[in-house]
Every structure is written in C-alpha cells, then in structure tokens.
C-alpha cells in the first residue's frame, strides 16, 4: 500500500530519495515522478509537502548543510589551531566527495529542473543572521577556527569573518576543481595542491612558513593514521 501523501514520514523519505537520485543520476534525475516512484507514492506527495520542486531543492540543500555540519563537528580541536584548519578542510573534502551532486545543489552550482537553492549574502552581518541555520552552522566551524588562530597569534589581527571566508573560498575552490577531475586521483591533489595552498594562505595571513608547514604536516599525519589513504 502506498504511503499517504500527508504521512509524517513521507517528507523525510522524499528528501532521502532526492539525495539518492542526485547521487545516481545527477540533477536531471531529480523529477517529481521519479521521486514519487522511489518511495511508492503519487506525485501529489511532492506538492503536498513542498508545494513544488523549488522548495524541495531548498530542503535538499539544507540537508546537505546539515550533513556537512555533522561531519565538521566530528573534528576534535587540538592545541594547534592551524593544524585544525587543515583537518576541517580534509573533512569538508571528505563530505563533498561522498556525494558531489548533493553539494553541487547545496552550494547552488547545480540547478535541478532549473531550480536553484536559495542562497544569501554572507558578507553582510545582518543578512547573514537571516540565512538558514544549517548553512550558518557549517560556516561557523571555519569562523571558530579563524578566531582561534588569530587569538593564538599565528595569524595577524583581522576581522574573523574575512579570514574564515578566505579559508572557505580557497577550500571550496580547490574541492570544486578536484571533483571536476582537474587534480588527478587519490592523494595527488591534496599533496600537491591543497596542502601548499593552505600553507601559502596561512603565511599570507601572518603565520611563518616553518610554523605553517609543521602544522599541516601534523594534521596530514594524524588524518592518515586515523583514516588511511586520503583518497575518497
């Protein structure tokens, strides 16, 4: 028997089905008919719970941010805040590589059926307060990392938001290019692009070359000891 369109579990099942369809078939696969078929319901279920595909895409993006936040929250802080930045970067990368299509929707790079997830201006503090809680929470992990590094004297005094946004820009740009296939396979991109990129950015923000290099080495060695090959 098909689930009732208004059943309390149907909305969550539709979101999970949407994420599976994205992973398996990309944005073209995210259609109301296919979603309904995935959970054994009628297409009316999509409109009952979301009002249309645009709101569904927004909810999928929020779920992407929730998953990213949950993963970033697994990173334990150490007494080396610069090393912690690279560990957050590696966890961020790990999250995206687990389902690149989900995060393409989450960050507005993909528009299933022409529907783009609602985004906001992160540079304006008032607007930032109005953004979805999930996206702000994910960004706040980088914001806290930037605050700790500045407080430790490793980076020169600067607005914490601006520092966090620079870290985010560098990291997300790297991951976007890696997902597109520009940086090879396995650890090649991490070793030859991501690590030097974060060292360069750290030095530019005030750290010494020796200190930044030592910190990222600590992070890489710790990650590999726990997770093995950085790969995917």
Image: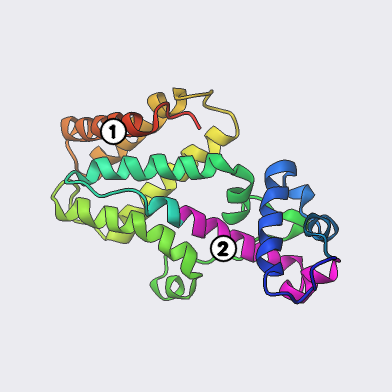
| Residue position marked by numbered label 2 in the rendering | 62
Residue at the spot 58% in from the left edge and 49% down from the top edge: 103
41 left or right of 177 in image: right
Viewer-proximal residue, 196 or 64? Answer: 64
Which portion, as a residue range, is magenta?
42-68
Q: Is residue 77 magenta?
A: no
Type of secondary structure dominating the magenta stretch:
helix
Residue 196: image location, x then y, percent: 34, 30
Q: CA distance from mark 2 to mark 1?
A: 30 Å
Secondary structure under tag 2 reads: helix
Judge whether residue 122 can be spotted in this image: no
| Residue position marked by numbered label 1 in the rendering | 222
**Residue reaching furthest to the left:** 153
**Quadrant hosting residue 70:** bottom left
Residue 117: image location, x then y, percent: 63, 62
Residue 181: image location, x then y, percent: 59, 29
Q: Earlier in the sequence, mark 2 or mark 1?
A: 2
Quadrant for the N terminus, please: bottom right
- Disc 1 crowd, CA 10 A, few/some/many (<14, 14-19, 20+): some
Secondary structure under tag 1 reads: helix
């Amino acid at each position: 028997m098909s689930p009732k369109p208004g059943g309390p579990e149907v909305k969550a099942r539709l979101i999970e089905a949407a994420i599976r369809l994205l992973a398996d078939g990309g944005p073209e696969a995210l259609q109301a008919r296919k979603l309904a078929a995935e959970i054994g319901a009628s297409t009316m279920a999509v409109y009952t719970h979301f009002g249309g595909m645009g709101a569904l895409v927004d909810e999928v993006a929020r779920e992407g941010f929730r998953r990213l936040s949950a993963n970033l929250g697994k990173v334990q802080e150490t007494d080396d805040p610069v090393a912690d930045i690279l560990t957050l970067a590696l966890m961020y990368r790990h999250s995206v590589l687990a389902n690149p299509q989900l995060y393409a929707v989450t960050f507005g790079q993909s528009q299933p059926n022409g529907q783009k997830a609602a985004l906001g201006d992160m540079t304006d503090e008032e607007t930032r307060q109005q953004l979805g809680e999930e996206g702000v929470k994910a960004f706040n992990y980088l914001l806290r990392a930037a605050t700790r590094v500045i407080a430790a004297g490793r980076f020169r005094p600067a607005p914490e938001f601006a520092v966090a946004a620079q870290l985010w820009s560098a990291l997300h740009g790297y991951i976007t290019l890696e997902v597109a296939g520009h940086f090879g396979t396995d650890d090649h991109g991490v070793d030859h692009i991501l690590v030097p990129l974060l060292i360069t950015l750290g030095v530019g923000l005030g750290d010494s070359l020796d200190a930044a290099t030592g910190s990222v080495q600590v992070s890489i060695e710790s990650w590999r000891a726990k997770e093995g090959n950085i790969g995917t």
